[in-house]
Amino acid sequence: MILPPPPLLPGQAPVGRAALFLDFDGTLVEIAARPDAVVVPPGLPGLLLRLRAELGGALAVVSGRPLPQLDHFLPVPLAKAGDHGASIRPGPDRLAESPPLPVPPEAWRAQAMALARAHPGMLVEEKTHGFALHYRLAPAAGPLAEALLTGMVADSPFQLLAARMAWEVRPRGPSKASAVRRLMQDPAFAGRVPVFIGDDVTDEEGMDAARAFGGFGWQLQHAFGSPAALRGWLAQAMAHPLATP
Ligand SMILES: [Mg+2]
Protein backbone atom coordinates (compact mmCIF):
# COMPACT_ATOMS: atom_id res chain seq x y z
CA MET A 1 0.00 0.00 0.00
CA ILE A 2 1.13 3.55 -0.62
CA LEU A 3 0.51 6.13 2.08
CA PRO A 4 -0.53 9.58 0.90
CA PRO A 5 1.48 12.50 2.31
CA PRO A 6 0.13 14.06 5.49
CA PRO A 7 -2.22 17.03 5.05
CA LEU A 8 0.28 19.81 5.70
CA LEU A 9 3.10 18.55 3.56
CA PRO A 10 1.67 18.94 0.05
CA GLY A 11 3.97 17.99 -2.75
CA GLN A 12 5.88 15.45 -0.74
CA ALA A 13 6.16 12.16 -2.54
CA PRO A 14 3.74 9.46 -1.48
CA VAL A 15 5.37 6.73 0.52
CA GLY A 16 5.30 3.34 -1.12
CA ARG A 17 6.14 0.15 0.76
CA ALA A 18 5.97 2.08 3.99
CA ALA A 19 6.78 0.83 7.46
CA LEU A 20 4.85 2.82 10.04
CA PHE A 21 6.30 3.68 13.45
CA LEU A 22 3.74 5.39 15.64
CA ASP A 23 4.17 7.00 19.03
CA PHE A 24 1.23 6.47 21.40
CA ASP A 25 0.63 9.35 23.89
CA GLY A 26 -0.05 12.65 22.18
CA THR A 27 0.17 10.97 18.76
CA LEU A 28 -2.38 8.15 18.47
CA VAL A 29 -4.29 9.35 21.53
CA GLU A 30 -4.75 12.75 23.13
CA ILE A 31 -2.58 13.58 26.15
CA ALA A 32 -4.51 13.24 29.40
CA ALA A 33 -4.02 15.01 32.72
CA ARG A 34 -2.60 11.77 34.13
CA PRO A 35 -0.86 8.99 32.17
CA ASP A 36 -3.44 6.42 33.31
CA ALA A 37 -6.33 8.59 32.15
CA VAL A 38 -5.77 8.45 28.38
CA VAL A 39 -8.82 7.53 26.37
CA VAL A 40 -8.37 5.12 23.46
CA PRO A 41 -11.04 5.69 20.81
CA PRO A 42 -12.95 2.43 20.35
CA GLY A 43 -12.03 2.11 16.68
CA LEU A 44 -8.29 2.64 17.09
CA PRO A 45 -7.07 -0.89 17.92
CA GLY A 46 -8.98 -2.35 14.98
CA LEU A 47 -7.73 0.37 12.64
CA LEU A 48 -4.11 -0.34 13.61
CA LEU A 49 -4.65 -4.04 13.08
CA ARG A 50 -6.07 -3.51 9.58
CA LEU A 51 -3.25 -1.11 8.70
CA ARG A 52 -0.72 -3.62 9.93
CA ALA A 53 -2.19 -6.30 7.67
CA GLU A 54 -2.21 -3.86 4.74
CA LEU A 55 1.47 -3.07 5.41
CA GLY A 56 2.53 -6.71 5.55
CA GLY A 57 3.18 -6.51 9.27
CA ALA A 58 5.32 -3.35 9.03
CA LEU A 59 3.58 -1.32 11.74
CA ALA A 60 4.91 -0.73 15.23
CA VAL A 61 3.80 1.36 18.19
CA VAL A 62 6.91 2.94 19.74
CA SER A 63 6.28 4.45 23.16
CA GLY A 64 7.90 5.48 26.40
CA ARG A 65 5.39 3.34 28.25
CA PRO A 66 6.18 -0.19 29.43
CA LEU A 67 4.90 -2.97 27.14
CA PRO A 68 2.22 -4.17 29.62
CA GLN A 69 0.66 -0.69 29.56
CA LEU A 70 0.72 -0.62 25.76
CA ASP A 71 -0.91 -4.06 25.75
CA HIS A 72 -3.54 -2.74 28.16
CA PHE A 73 -4.43 0.27 26.04
CA LEU A 74 -3.98 -1.48 22.67
CA PRO A 75 -5.00 -5.09 23.30
CA VAL A 76 -4.31 -6.19 19.72
CA PRO A 77 -1.40 -8.13 18.21
CA LEU A 78 1.04 -5.50 16.93
CA ALA A 79 4.79 -5.01 17.00
CA LYS A 80 5.44 -2.82 20.05
CA ALA A 81 8.46 -1.07 21.49
CA GLY A 82 8.14 0.14 25.07
CA ASP A 83 10.27 2.00 27.60
CA HIS A 84 11.79 4.19 24.86
CA GLY A 85 13.26 1.21 23.07
CA ALA A 86 14.40 -0.71 26.15
CA SER A 87 11.71 -3.40 25.57
CA ILE A 88 10.88 -4.50 22.03
CA ARG A 89 8.41 -7.12 20.86
CA PRO A 90 9.16 -7.32 17.12
CA GLY A 91 5.90 -9.07 16.25
CA PRO A 92 2.68 -10.13 17.95
CA ASP A 93 3.69 -13.76 18.45
CA ARG A 94 7.25 -12.98 19.51
CA LEU A 95 8.98 -12.70 22.85
CA ALA A 96 9.93 -9.26 24.11
CA GLU A 97 13.62 -8.40 23.93
CA SER A 98 15.09 -6.41 26.80
CA PRO A 99 18.81 -5.77 27.01
CA PRO A 100 20.08 -5.79 30.63
CA LEU A 101 19.90 -2.25 31.98
CA PRO A 102 20.76 -0.56 35.28
CA VAL A 103 18.08 0.26 37.84
CA PRO A 104 18.12 3.74 39.38
CA PRO A 105 19.07 3.90 43.09
CA GLU A 106 16.04 3.70 45.39
CA ALA A 107 17.12 6.98 47.01
CA TRP A 108 16.42 8.82 43.74
CA ARG A 109 12.83 7.67 43.68
CA ALA A 110 12.44 8.62 47.34
CA GLN A 111 13.73 12.14 46.65
CA ALA A 112 11.44 12.49 43.66
CA MET A 113 8.47 11.35 45.77
CA ALA A 114 9.37 13.84 48.47
CA LEU A 115 9.42 16.66 45.91
CA ALA A 116 6.06 15.48 44.54
CA ARG A 117 4.54 15.44 48.03
CA ALA A 118 5.70 19.03 48.56
CA HIS A 119 4.01 20.16 45.33
CA PRO A 120 0.39 18.98 45.09
CA GLY A 121 -0.39 17.83 41.56
CA MET A 122 3.14 16.67 40.85
CA LEU A 123 3.37 12.92 40.46
CA VAL A 124 5.95 10.18 40.06
CA GLU A 125 5.29 7.62 37.35
CA GLU A 126 7.08 4.29 37.64
CA LYS A 127 8.85 3.10 34.51
CA THR A 128 10.45 -0.32 34.04
CA HIS A 129 13.96 1.14 33.96
CA GLY A 130 13.48 4.47 35.71
CA PHE A 131 10.76 6.93 36.60
CA ALA A 132 9.17 10.15 35.41
CA LEU A 133 8.26 13.23 37.39
CA HIS A 134 5.13 14.87 35.96
CA TYR A 135 4.40 18.52 36.66
CA ARG A 136 1.45 19.11 34.32
CA LEU A 137 -0.77 19.78 37.35
CA ALA A 138 1.96 21.77 39.17
CA PRO A 139 3.63 23.73 36.36
CA ALA A 140 5.44 26.18 38.64
CA ALA A 141 7.44 23.30 40.12
CA GLY A 142 8.84 22.17 36.74
CA PRO A 143 12.23 23.90 37.20
CA LEU A 144 12.60 22.39 40.68
CA ALA A 145 12.03 18.93 39.23
CA GLU A 146 14.57 19.57 36.51
CA ALA A 147 17.18 20.82 38.99
CA LEU A 148 16.72 17.84 41.31
CA LEU A 149 16.89 15.23 38.56
CA THR A 150 19.75 16.91 36.68
CA GLY A 151 21.85 16.67 39.82
CA MET A 152 20.94 12.99 40.27
CA VAL A 153 21.88 11.76 36.83
CA ALA A 154 25.17 13.69 36.53
CA ASP A 155 28.07 11.24 36.08
CA SER A 156 25.71 8.26 36.18
CA PRO A 157 24.65 5.67 33.58
CA PHE A 158 21.29 7.49 33.47
CA GLN A 159 20.08 10.47 31.49
CA LEU A 160 17.37 13.06 31.98
CA LEU A 161 14.82 13.37 29.26
CA ALA A 162 12.43 16.26 28.68
CA ALA A 163 8.90 15.04 27.95
CA ARG A 164 5.73 17.10 27.73
CA MET A 165 5.32 18.61 31.24
CA ALA A 166 7.47 15.84 32.69
CA TRP A 167 11.09 14.91 33.26
CA GLU A 168 12.12 11.31 32.89
CA VAL A 169 15.13 9.48 34.31
CA ARG A 170 16.13 6.57 32.09
CA PRO A 171 19.26 4.57 31.25
CA ARG A 172 21.51 5.86 28.53
CA GLY A 173 21.61 3.65 25.45
CA PRO A 174 18.18 2.49 24.31
CA SER A 175 16.08 5.04 22.47
CA LYS A 176 13.30 5.25 19.95
CA ALA A 177 16.12 5.37 17.38
CA SER A 178 17.53 2.03 18.52
CA ALA A 179 13.97 0.62 18.42
CA VAL A 180 13.59 1.72 14.79
CA ARG A 181 16.98 0.27 13.88
CA ARG A 182 16.15 -3.04 15.58
CA LEU A 183 12.74 -3.37 13.97
CA MET A 184 14.08 -2.44 10.52
CA GLN A 185 16.18 -5.62 10.73
CA ASP A 186 13.03 -7.69 11.08
CA PRO A 187 11.74 -9.38 7.90
CA ALA A 188 8.38 -7.58 8.09
CA PHE A 189 10.08 -4.15 8.11
CA ALA A 190 13.35 -4.71 6.23
CA GLY A 191 13.62 -2.93 2.89
CA ARG A 192 10.60 -0.73 3.51
CA VAL A 193 10.50 3.06 3.83
CA PRO A 194 10.12 3.89 7.52
CA VAL A 195 7.72 6.67 8.47
CA PHE A 196 7.99 7.72 12.11
CA ILE A 197 5.18 9.88 13.49
CA GLY A 198 5.44 11.38 16.97
CA ASP A 199 4.82 14.50 19.01
CA ASP A 200 7.63 14.63 21.55
CA VAL A 201 11.34 15.23 22.06
CA THR A 202 12.08 11.49 22.29
CA ASP A 203 10.34 10.95 18.98
CA GLU A 204 12.86 13.14 17.19
CA GLU A 205 15.45 10.38 17.67
CA GLY A 206 13.06 7.92 16.04
CA MET A 207 12.42 10.37 13.21
CA ASP A 208 16.17 10.79 12.62
CA ALA A 209 16.59 7.02 12.54
CA ALA A 210 13.77 6.73 9.99
CA ARG A 211 15.42 9.39 7.82
CA ALA A 212 18.72 7.52 8.02
CA PHE A 213 16.91 4.59 6.34
CA GLY A 214 15.72 6.91 3.56
CA GLY A 215 12.38 7.39 5.29
CA PHE A 216 10.45 10.20 6.90
CA GLY A 217 9.94 11.71 10.32
CA TRP A 218 6.66 13.55 10.68
CA GLN A 219 6.06 15.77 13.67
CA LEU A 220 2.44 15.26 14.72
CA GLN A 221 1.60 18.88 15.47
CA HIS A 222 3.18 20.16 12.27
CA ALA A 223 2.02 17.46 9.86
CA PHE A 224 -1.43 16.67 11.26
CA GLY A 225 -2.28 19.13 14.02
CA SER A 226 -3.85 16.65 16.41
CA PRO A 227 -4.09 12.95 17.23
CA ALA A 228 -7.67 13.00 15.90
CA ALA A 229 -6.41 14.32 12.55
CA LEU A 230 -3.74 11.61 12.42
CA ARG A 231 -6.34 8.94 13.14
CA GLY A 232 -8.47 10.39 10.36
CA TRP A 233 -5.52 10.26 7.98
CA LEU A 234 -4.75 6.65 8.93
CA ALA A 235 -8.38 5.69 8.40
CA GLN A 236 -8.40 7.46 5.05
CA ALA A 237 -5.12 5.79 4.02
CA MET A 238 -6.82 2.52 4.93
CA ALA A 239 -10.02 3.30 3.06
CA HIS A 240 -8.27 4.43 -0.12
CA PRO A 241 -5.08 2.46 -0.54
CA LEU A 242 -3.58 4.03 -3.65
CA ALA A 243 -1.62 0.99 -4.68
CA THR A 244 -0.36 -2.27 -3.34
CA PRO A 245 3.20 -2.94 -4.41
MG1 LIG B 1 4.12 11.19 22.60
Image: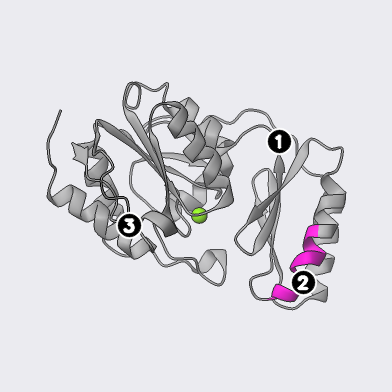
Left/right of residue 90 with respect to residue 9 in the rendered view: right
Judge whether residue 111 can be spotted in this image.
Answer: yes
Rendering quarter of residue 79? top left
Which residue in the protein does label 2 denote?
141
| Residue at image coords 87%, 51% | 151
- 166 lies above or below 70: below
Q: Secondary structure beneath disc 3?
A: helix
Residue 230's disc number:
3
Disc 1 marks a residue whose amino acid type is Arg
CA gap, disc 2 and disc 3: 32 Å
Disc 3 marks a residue whose amino acid type is Leu
Give coordinates of residue 94: x percent, y percent: 41, 29
Front residue (pair 58, 228):
228
Left/right of residue 216 with respect to residue 146 in the rendered view: left
Q: Write down the region rendered in magenta.
A: 138-146
Mark whose residue sits in front, 1 or 3: 3
